[in-house]
Image (cartoon, grey):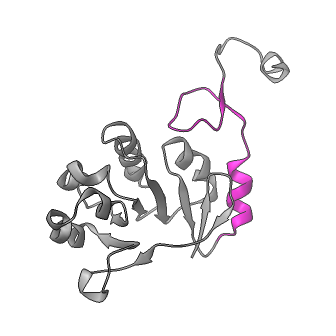
Amino acid sequence: MTVINIRGEAIDQTWRDVDGAGETDSLDSAVLSLTSLKEHIEALDQKSLSRIGARLTIDDNIKEVADSAKHLGLIELVFSHFKDGRPFSTAVMLRRDYGFKGELRASGDILPDQALFLIRCGFSTIAVPQQFSVEQFRAALSAYSVAYQAGSDDQLELVSDLRRSAVEVAAE
């Protein structure tokens, strides 16, 4: 799996997929399911949580670990189908309501056309599905330089007056 950042650059994968804590001696850099995380969360302090990741599906309720979510080092939101937009809303909620500052990764059934929207909602990395190339995602991330609505990112400049013409906006 190739993971890219918001500029479309491939990054080193330091997180390990772990289904349950029994499969590893250490939880450092381990990505746990919500069920596994809930089993161990009481025994972990903030520093330990910062070295742990959580993988959430659309069926998982982030509110179950809301108090600890902001201390996690990684939260991976899995898109079960590209037509299901719930992970976009969850990403915004994690950043805005829960104060999550760590790596927020999108994985699963994602299309290159969704890449810019992922970043605008607060995702910091994308696990590129095997059927697509990094170049396809990189091109999608650089397709636009302005936006009409504020987002979680600061990648795009906001158009301040929608009544202006495209020529006026381009001249800025």
**In the image: residue 42, left or right of residue 151:** left
Q: Is residue 146 above or below residue 64?
A: above
**In the image: residue 43, left or right of residue 31:** left
Q: Is residue 151 above or below residue 142?
A: above
> Which residue is depicted at the point 69% across and 52% down?
140
**Where on the picture, by quarter, is residue 64?**
bottom left
Q: Nearer the viewer, residue 126 or 10?
A: 10
| Residues in magenta, as a range | 132-158
**Where on the picture, by quarter, is residue 20?**
bottom left
- How far from the left and from the top, in percent, is residue 21? 25, 81
> Which residue is depicted at the point 21% across and 55% down?
65
**In the image: residue 78, left or right of residue 161:** left
- How far from the left and from the top, in percent, is residue 18? 35, 80
Numbered marks: total: 0
**In the image: residue 100, left or right of residue 148:** left
Q: Which part of the image, by quadrant, shows the N terminus? A: bottom right
Q: Is residue 157 magenta?
A: yes
> Which residue is depicted at the point 43% across and 78% down?
16
Q: Is residue 53 above or below residue 166?
A: below
Q: Which part of the image, by quadrant, shows the C terminus? A: top right
**Where on the picture, by quarter, is residue 60?**
bottom left
Q: Nearer the viewer, residue 85 or 169?
A: 169
Q: Is residue 140 magenta?
A: yes
